[in-house]
Image (tube, rainbow, N blue to C red):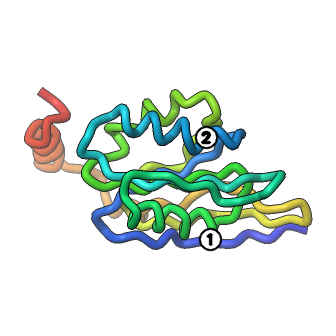
Amino acid sequence: MIDIEVVPLEKPDDVNVIVGQSHFIKTVEDLHEALVGVGGTLRFGIAFCEASGARLVRRTGNDPALEDLAVAAATAVGAGHCFVIMLREGFPVNVLNQVKAVPEVCSIFCATANPVQVLVAVTAAGRGVTGVIDGEPPVGVETEQDIAERRDLLRAIGYKL
């Protein structure tokens, strides 16, 4: 038997979240080091669910409120080897390559500021993330004006020249 649970991640609108899977207790320290290396203004909290042994939610960060948010989200998901990173004063695009480069990281399920629901499969053996719901479906196709506005925005915020 398998059940699917929908687990909403609670976070303020100004917080970005990255949800992923890794494979080793060292993940929490290595993710911390990767994020610190990005820059001094980035605020973050990290939580990681152990899948065996003590089976604790391991945690770290440089912002206690974000660390608490990450722990609450990881605890709600409760899937082995799942990690949650909560970010402020930076965006996933600024850290995603560094996160993916951590040797223990197996996959990234999402990196977003949107409301997120994590789909968790539950069996007799445990819990595992099967995917995420990240945002709403499209309501149309962009127009030429939308394209121009997108390009202008990317240049205005420094992501394109």
Q: What quarter of the picture does the N terminus occupy? A: bottom right
**Near-viewer residue (39 or 97):** 39
Q: Which residue is mark 1?
A: 76
For image coordinates 43% across by 31% down, the residue present is 97
Q: Is residue 112 visible?
A: no
Mark 1 residue type: Ala
Of labels 1 and 2, earlier in sequence is 2
For image coordinates 86% across by 65% down, the residue present is 123
Say if 16 sits above or below 28 in the image.
below
Q: Secondary structure at mark 1?
A: helix
Residue 93 in the image, given as x and y percentages of width and height: 34, 39
Say if 137 sits above or below 96 in the image.
below
Q: Which mark is residue 45?
A: none
Residue 137 lies in quadrant: bottom left
For image coordinates 64% across by 65% down, the residue present is 77
Residue 151 in the image, given as x and y percentages of width and height: 15, 39
Mark 1 or mark 2: which is in front? 2
Residue 3 in the image, given as x and y percentages of width and height: 80, 71
Mark 2 residue type: Thr
Q: Which residue is mark 2?
A: 27
The answer to whether 152 appears left or right of 56 in the picture is: left
Task: State yes or no: discs 1 and 2 in contact (Cβ < 8 Å).
Answer: no
Residue 61 in the image, given as x and y percentages of width and height: 44, 52
For image coordinates 65% across by 59% down, the residue present is 57
**Near-viewer residue (159 or 67):** 67
Q: Is residue 50 visible?
A: yes
Q: Secondary structure at mark 2?
A: helix
